[in-house]
Amino acid sequence: MQNMFLATQTIAEHSSFFFGMGDARMGMVDTRDVAECAAECVLNDHFNGNIYEVTGAKSLSYFDVASALSEELKRTITYVPVMPQDVYDGIVGAG
């Protein structure tokens, strides 16, 4: 979920954000929730030997996120999908 912080400036300035996820859906999770879950598993023997997948309550696309942000901010926010190669090139170009 914290990846959305990478988009705050473009959302504020351009009412849009860009990621290389297309229309894929994911269960967004706050890192604090992941940490709380891990701590509980470490501190409680009840979880020994089990495997858990930590995920959000709902699978969302970035289109869904844009819709929720639009509703909350009372203005249109647009998700712009970026081709994976362009994401790669941008990361490499940034060093």
Image (tube, rainbow, N blue to C red):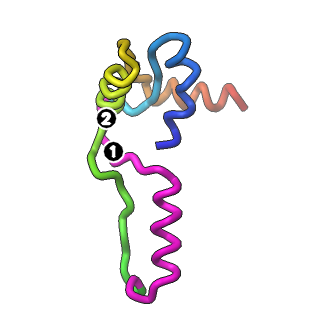
- Which mark is first along the chain, 1 or 2? 1
Residue 10 percent coordinates (x, y): 54, 18
Q: How far is mark 2 from mark 1, CA to CA?
A: 6 Å
Q: Is residue 72 above or below residue 32?
A: above
What's the residue at 30%, 24% (across, down)?
A: 67
Q: Reply yes or no: does residue 28 show up in magenta.
A: yes
Which amino acid, mark 2?
A: Ser
Q: Which residues are magenta?
A: 23-47
Q: Reply yes or no: does residue 40 show up in magenta.
A: yes
Q: Is residue 49 above or below residue 87?
A: below
At label 1, counting other C-alpha atoms closer than 10 Å, the crowd grade (few under 14, some 14-19, many 20 or more) is some
What's the residue at 52%, 42% (across, down)?
A: 2
What's the residue at 45%, 13% (across, down)?
A: 15
Instruction: Name the residue that disc number 1 marks.
Output: 26
Instruction: Name the residue that disc number 2 marks.
Output: 61
> Residues at badges 2 and 1 in contact (C-beta under 8 Å)?
yes
Q: Is residue 93 above or below residue 50?
A: above
What's the residue at 47%, 50% (across, down)?
A: 30
Which amino acid, mark 1?
A: Met
Residue 61 percent coordinates (x, y): 31, 34
Q: Magenta part mainly helix, strand or loop? A: helix
